[in-house]
Structures are given as structure tokens and as C-alpha cells.
């Protein structure tokens, strides 16, 4: 009886913690959506449940000539898709090399990747800024994409390498006996088996440009090249100051492409996150 009571209390405690965390996460999202439906622009007159809710702010983002929201959205999608594709290609190839080949400096290279994970990209932004300026990539999408790709490289390579290490090498040997080359093994054997962890890397690298503000703030200067994070910042800081309701509407719409990619990759994500955490 005592054991069953203890188990019931433990389960109740777990559910209570989950509910508290759910409320903490959901509360700001509900407020942001509510802000986007409130008429006017003032932050102090907002209500969680608007008396006269309206979609005028969403219409303004796409129809008003003063709004560059569509351009910011397009810029962000270009950077996000390019970052996702480039990161997946580069990460999988490097992880394959570290996982399946033995070469001079391999161990030190792996330790270097581990060490680089400890330092955020922003610690080297001064050097990155000077380097991009030297090669004329400052204020370009190419420069921004390169920073995203190489900034997330250490963590992603180590994550995928850990996953590939769990795939039996007997599969490689069997394929070699049948005449398969290294690239055939890579594309036709390892990559299909590693789809869960590749989906995780693809989702995280695709999401990064939507949420990051500091990196494009440092690299991008031209208003026509602003990403969503930079552009939306103007609604509450620049000539559109105090336009918090339009800012909220713009942030809500950011979820659409991320949710779409998540739904496309969801069958791989759960196993990829779990396996990457335990095997990496």
C-alpha cells in the first residue's frame, strides 16, 4: 500500500512539474498572439482577451507600402534554406570521415571540435567581422551563411559522428566485398540509417536564422538585406517605435516555416534527438 501511494505521489509530482513548465512556456506565446489581435499599437492598453480583436496588423504587414516584411521573410528563408542544406552536406561528410577513417591528426582534430563547442561564435565576432571585410563578404548573405555554417560545425559534426559510430562497421565491410566504394557506402548505407540525426541537424540549422539577432546585426548593414529578426526590431526601436502589436503579429508568423519543416521531419526527430543524446 505504501509503495503504491509512493508511486502515485511520484507520478503526480511529475505531472505537476510538466504542467508548470507547460504554463511557463505557453504564457508568453498566448500573450504574443493576443497582442497581435489587439487594436492600436500601445503596449500598456493591451488585454489578454481583446474586447475587439482584429487581424489588421497581419494585413498591414503584407499590404502597407511602409512594410518590408515580405522582403525580410524572403531574405530569412534564403539564409535558412542555404544554411540547412550547406550544414547537412558538410556535417555529414566530416562526420563520416571522422567516424570511418583513421588518419594522422584525427584524435587531435576530434579534441579540437570538442574544445570549440565550449566557446560561442560571438566570442570571435571581431575577427570574423575583419575577415569578412577583408574578403568583401561583409553585408552579404554569403558571409552570413558562412558564419552560421561554420559556427555550428563543431557541435553538429560531433553529434552526427557519435551517431555514425553506433552503426556496425560490418555493413561497410560487406558492401566493400560486393564492390562498393566509399561514396556508395556513404550515400546508400550510412545516410539512410542516419536520417534521424540528419533531420535534427537540418531542423536546428534551418531554425537558427529565424531566431538569431546579434549575428546579422553585426554582419548585415543594408536595410534591403535585413532578416526577420533585424527587421522586426525596427518596429519597436526605429521609425516604427512602440508598434508592439505589429511586432507581435510578425513574430507569430515566423512559426509557419519552422512548423512546416518540423512536420515534414517529425517521424525522424524523436528518435534522432534521443539517439543523439545517448549515442553522441
Image (cartoon, helix red, strand yellow):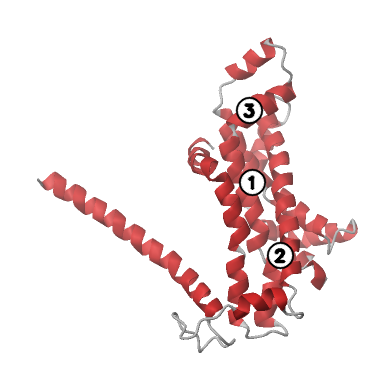
- Residue 202 is labelled as 1
The answer to whether residue 217 of the structure is visible from this angle is no
Element at label 2: helix
Query: Which residue lies at the image location 73% right of the left edge and 68% below the top edge?
Result: 70
Q: Determine whether 46 is above or below 69 in the image.
A: below
Query: Which residue lies at the image location 67% right of the left edge and 25% below the top edge?
Result: 188
The answer to which quarter of the image holds residue 167 is: top right
Query: Which residue lies at the image location 69% right of the left edge and 42% below the top edge?
Result: 88
Mark 3 vs mark 2, CA separation in Å? 35 Å
- Residue 190 is labelled as 3
Mark 3 vs mark 1, CA separation in Å? 17 Å
Q: Earlier in the sequence, mark 1 or mark 2?
A: 2
Q: Nearer the viewer, mark 3 or mark 2?
A: 2
Query: Which residue lies at the image location 73% right of the left edge and 27% below the top edge?
Result: 104
Task: Name the residue at the top extreme.
Answer: 177
- Residue 101 is labelled as none
Amino acid at each position: 500500500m505504501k509503495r503504491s501511494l509512493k508511486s502515485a505521489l511520484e507520478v503526480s509530482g511529475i505531472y505537476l512539474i510538466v504542467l508548470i513548465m507547460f504554463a511557463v512556456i505557453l504564457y508568453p506565446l498566448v500573450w504574443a498572439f493576443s497582442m497581435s489581435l489587439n487594436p492600436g499599437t500601445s503596449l500598456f492598453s493591451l488585454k489578454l482577451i481583446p474586447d475587439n480583436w482584429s487581424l489588421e496588423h497581419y494585413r498591414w504587414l503584407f499590404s502597407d507600402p511602409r512594410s518590408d516584411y515580405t522582403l525580410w521573410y524572403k531574405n530569412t528563408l534564403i539564409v535558412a534554406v542555404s544554411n540547412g542544406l550547406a550544414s547537412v552536406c558538410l556535417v555529414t561528410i566530416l562526420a563520416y570521415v571522422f567516424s570511418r577513417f583513421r588518419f594522422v591528426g584525427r584524435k587531435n582534430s576530434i579534441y579540437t571540435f570538442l574544445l570549440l563547442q565550449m566557446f560561442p561564435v560571438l566570442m570571435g565576432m571581431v575577427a570574423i567581422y575583419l575577415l569578412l571585410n577583408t574578403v568583401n563578404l561583409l553585408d552579404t548573405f554569403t558571409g552570413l551563411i558562412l558564419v552560421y555554417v561554420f559556427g555550428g560545425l563543431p557541435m553538429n559534426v560531433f553529434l552526427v559522428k557519435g551517431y555514425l559510430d553506433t552503426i556496425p562497421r560490418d555493413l561497410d565491410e560487406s558492401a566493400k566485398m560486393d564492390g562498393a566504394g566509399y561514396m556508395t557506402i556513404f550515400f546508400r548505407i550510412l545516410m539512410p540509417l542516419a536520417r534521424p540525426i540528419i533531420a535534427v541537424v537540418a531542423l536546428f540549422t534551418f531554425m537558427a536564422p529565424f531566431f538569431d539577432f546579434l549575428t546579422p546585426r553585426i554582419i548585415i548593414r543594408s536595410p534591403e538585406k535585413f532578416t526577420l529578426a533585424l527587421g522586426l526590431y525596427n518596429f519597436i526601436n526605429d521609425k516604427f517605435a512602440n508598434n508592439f502589436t505589429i511586432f507581435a503579429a510578425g513574430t507569430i508568423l515566423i512559426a509557419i516555416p519552422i512548423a512546416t519543416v518540423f512536420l515534414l521531419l517529425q517521424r525522424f526527430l524523436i528518435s534522432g534527438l534521443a539517439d543523439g543524446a545517448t549515442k553522441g
